[in-house]
Structures are given as C-alpha cells and as structure tokens.
Image (tube, rainbow, N blue to C red):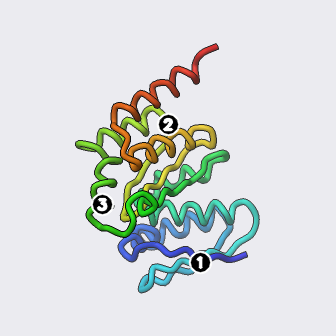
C-alpha cells in the first residue's frame, strides 16, 4: 500500500532528522519506506499492515507540529492521532483562525496544558489545525474540549467539562 501525506515544508527537516535519523527510526519501527520530497513537502509512505498506518500517523503528527519524541508515542498500541480543522469553526478568515488558535492555546499556554493534563493527551496547535495524540478513550474528551473552545465556549465551561470527566473516571 502507499499513501502520499503532505506536510509543511518547514517540518520536512524535523521529519528527516539529523543525518536522516528520524526517518530511519520510523522506517525501522514500521517496516515502511518513506520517500520525502523536501521541495513540496510530499511524503510517500509505502508499506503493509498495521505498522503502515502507524507510519502515516507519525508522519502526520510531525507535520502537525509534534516533536518526533512525542509523535513516537503513536508506535504504542491503542494510541491515536486526531486532527481538528480550525477552518470548520472559522471559515477562511485568517484573523478568526488566529483568534481560535489563541483560544485553544490560552494565556501562556494554560488552556492547552489544562486539556493535556486532565485528558492525558498531547496537543499541538499548528497552522489551521489542532492535532491530538492520546488513548482511544481519552482522545474523544480532549477533542470535545478543543471543539468547545473553537465553538466559543468559555474556558471555565471547558474546564468544568473536564473536571466532570475526571470525576466520572474514578467513581466506583
């Protein structure tokens, strides 16, 4: 199987890594082959089986702003990558997109950190997307919290949602 994944040109160097180390690690772990066009940002992923899909997700995660170390969490079983398109909430207006990115990040990164801490997920806000890495059960709540902020909910409302989520997880 093969799939072409487009990543921003400024993330190609991160995907390749020093002396090709990151690319080599992805290929070794997944037994997939990556053909990277550094001019266009196109990455062709060639492989088979479940590990092929993990290679695609790791490439997408690095392209969406995660460091390789954080993206490599996707090699573990049950971890998923979800990407929320900010333009679904803002349209094409760049100033609206910037404002919504700011809402997800929060003052000094507090909103993003709060979501990460309470859902045990990792979040990267890059360009027109919010990317989330987490376990299958927890990632949905992180997505819901992000979508609440993008839809205009107050930070306090989102935090109350997450507090209720955390209480519900530990009740017997």
Measured in 3D between alpha carbons, the distance from the residue under mark 1 to the one under mark 2, in whole angstroms, is: 30 Å
Dot 1, crowdedness within 10 Å: few (<14), some or many (≥20)?
Answer: some
Q: Are marks 3 and 2 in contact (CB under 8 Å)?
A: no
Front: mark 3 or 2: 3
SS under mark 3: helix
Question: Taking 156 as reference, is 21 above or below it?
Answer: below
Q: Residue at x 42, y 27 (%)?
A: 160
Left or right relative to 117: residue 97: left
Q: Earlier in the sequence, mark 3 or mark 2?
A: 3
Dot 3, crowdedness within 10 Å: few (<14), some or many (≥20)?
Answer: some
Q: Residue at x 56, y 54 (%)?
A: 81
Mark 1, residue position: 4
Q: Position of residue 78 (x, y in %)?
A: 66, 45
- The front one of 97 and 73 is 97
Dot 2, crowdedness within 10 Å: few (<14), some or many (≥20)?
Answer: some
- The front one of 108 and 14 is 108
Q: Earlier in the sequence, mark 1 or mark 3?
A: 1
SS under mark 1: strand
Left or right relative to 108: residue 83: right
Mark 2, residue position: 120
The tally of labels here is 3
Measured in 3D between alpha carbons, the distance from the residue under mark 3 to the one under mark 2, in whole angstroms, is: 28 Å
Mark 3, residue position: 96
Quarter of the image where one finds residue 128 = bottom left
Q: Position of residue 19 (x, y in %)?
A: 43, 73
Question: Taking 9 as reference, is 170 above or below it?
Answer: above
Q: Position of residue 163 (x, y in %)?
A: 45, 25
Q: Residue furthest right?
A: 49
SS under mark 2: loop
């Amino acid at each position: 199987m093969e799939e072409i994944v487009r990543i921003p040109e400024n993330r190609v160097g991160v995907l390749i890594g020093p002396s090709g180390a990151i690319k080599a690690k992805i290929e070794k772990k997944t037994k997939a082959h990556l053909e990277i066009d550094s001019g266009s940002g196109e990455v062709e992923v060639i492989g088979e089986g479940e590990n092929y899909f993990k290679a695609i997700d790791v490439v997408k995660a690095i392209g969406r702003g995660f460091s390789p170390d954080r993206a490599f969490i996707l090699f573990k079983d049950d971890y998923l990558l979800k990407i929320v398109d900010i333009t679904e909430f803002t349209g094409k207006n760049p100033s609206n997109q910037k404002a919504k990115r700011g809402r997800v990040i929060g003052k000094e990164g507090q909103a993003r950190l709060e979501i990460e801490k309470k859902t045990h997920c990792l979040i990267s806000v890059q360009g027109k997307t919010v990317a989330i890495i987490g376990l299958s059960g927890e990632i949905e709540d992180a997505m819901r919290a992000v979508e609440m902020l993008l839809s205009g909910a107050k930070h306090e409302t989102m935090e109350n949602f997450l507090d209720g989520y955390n209480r519900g997880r530990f009740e017997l």
